Image (tube, rainbow, N blue to C red):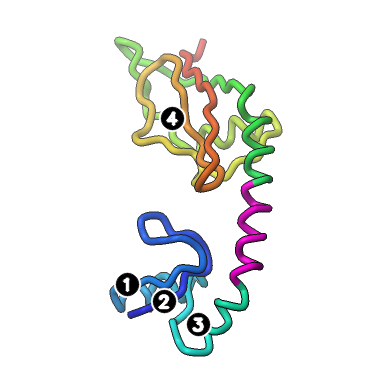
Amino acid sequence: MKVILREDVEHLGRSGELVTVKDGFGRNFLIPYKKAVLATEQNLRQLEHERAVIAARNAKLKGAAEEQAKKIGAVQVTIRRKVGEQDKLYGSVTALDIAEALAAQSVQVDRRHIHLPEPIKAVGQYEVELRLHRDVTAKIKVEVAAEA
């Protein structure tokens, strides 16, 4: 199935690209969630017309992400959790926990933008990457401390 992407899809393509996907992926995920449209003659002509609009929108989103990255760069987050022996946490610290801690400092970040390869399970300081845009990333310091 050939589809035209309406927004960036990781490991597939960027907004405005014509890609070939398996039928089920297109029919059950991309099209219902409005991430893509079928590649018909009419949609292809409309895409050519909208390329400039898409480029302008991406530039605006990138600019906003760069501004947000500047603000976020100086932020440090401390998360307190109960710990057991050898400073291992009961449970773990996930991207959602980091997003909530950032929100408490009045920095709004979607948890899906926080790149955490695996949950944090030990006390210490960590550097966590935020992917705000496909070309813009920011790093914050997250300190996981023992609860008193």
Distance between mark 3 and mark 1 Cα atoms: 17 Å
Q: Residues within 10 Å of mark 4 (few under 14, many from 20)?
A: many
Majority secondary structure of magenta residues: helix
Q: According to the image, label 3 marks what residue?
A: 44
Contact between labelled residues 2 and 3, with CB atoms less than 8 Å apart? no
Measured Cα–Cα span from mark 1 to mark 4: 35 Å
Q: SS class of the residue under badge 3?
A: helix
Magenta residues? Answer: 51-62
Looking at the rendered structure, the secondary structure element under dot 4 is strand
Mark 1 is surrounded, within 10 Å at the Cα level, by few (under 14), some (14 to 19) or many (20 or more) other residues, namely: some
Find the distance from the CA under tag 4 to the CA under tag 2: 38 Å
Q: Earlier in the sequence, mark 3 or mark 4?
A: 3
- Residue 125 coordinates in the image, percent (x, y): 45, 16
Mark count: 4
Q: Residue at 42% of width from left, 14% of height from top?
A: 124
Left or right of 119, for residue 32: right
Residue at position x 41%, y 76% in the image: 3
Q: Amino acid at mark 4?
A: Val
Position of residue 131 relative to residue 19, above or below, is: above
Q: Are marks 2 and 1 in contact (CB under 8 Å)?
A: yes
Give the image location of residue 32, x and y in percent.
Answer: 47, 75
Residue 68 lies left or right of residue 114; in this view the side is right
Instruction: Report which quarter residue 73 is drawn in.
Output: top right
- Whole-angstrom CA distance, mark 2 to mark 1, is 7 Å
**Which residue is found at the position 64% from the left and 67% from the top?**
52
Which is closer to the viewer, label 4 or label 2? 2
Frontmost residue, 129 versus 120: 129
Q: Which residue is under mark 4? A: 93
Q: Quadrant of the N terminus?
A: bottom left
Residue contact at pointers 1 and 4, CB within 8 angstroms: no
